[in-house]
Image (tube, rainbow, N blue to C red):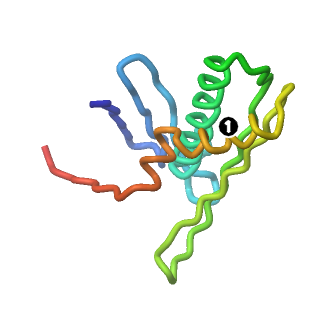
Amino acid sequence: MTKITAHIGAANYRTEIRSATNTIISDEPESAGGIDSGFSPYELLASSLAACTCITLRMYANRKGWELKDVKVEVYFEEETQENTTKITRTIELFGNLGQDQKDRLLNIANKCPIHKILSNTIEVKSELK
């Protein structure tokens, strides 16, 4: 099980996030009362999908010996408050000497990245006080 710890002190809304080996900062933009010293929570979620997609495609291309030089992924969030839904659009650009069959396969593989699978399935969040 992955453990992430977040800590917020008295400063609006700067939050330190730690894993076993890394630390990042999350914050809200100035327009929301923060000081914009790190990714917003929405940006962190979008960056998880973008990073996982890039890593998954790199791993697959390396295993196949394909000439994938670079991958660029853009992720957009669109919340529909009236329908209580969220639409995530992911745009993938592949760079390298790749045929159309390889590109089509990489798109299929992108949909199998672990974060994509998590976001596409039912998610249960349990909360408890310590």
Residue tagged by mark 1?
Answer: 106
Direction from residue 93 to residue 31 in the image, left or right: left
For image coordinates 42% across by 33% down, the residue present is 17
Tell me the quadrant of the picture where the C terminus can be found.
Answer: top left
**Residue 4, quarter of the rendered image:** top left
Q: Residue at x 64, y 31 (%)?
A: 57
Q: Residues within 10 Å of mark 1 (few under 14, many from 20)?
A: many
Q: Residue furthest front?
A: 101
In the rendered image, the vertical position of residue 107 relative to residue 90, given as above or below: above
Residue 128 image offset from top left, x and y in percent: 16, 51
Residue furthest to the left: 130
Relative to 118, is 36 on the left or the right?
right
| Residue at the right extreme, as displayed | 97
Q: Residue 34: image x %, image y %? A: 56, 50
At 60% from the left and 28% from the top, the residue drawn is 55
Q: Of 19 and 123, which appears nearest the observer?
A: 123
What quarter of the picture does the N terminus occupy? top left
Q: Callout 1, which amino acid?
A: Leu
List x then y, in percent, for residue 97.
86, 25
Left or right position of 97 against 37: right
Q: Residue at 28% of width from left, 56% of height from top?
A: 124
Q: Nearer the viewer, residue 110 or 80?
A: 110
Label 1: element kind: helix
Give above or below for 33 relative to 94: below
Q: Nearer the viewer, residue 33 or 40?
A: 40
- Between 48 and 21, the residue placed more toward the observer is 48
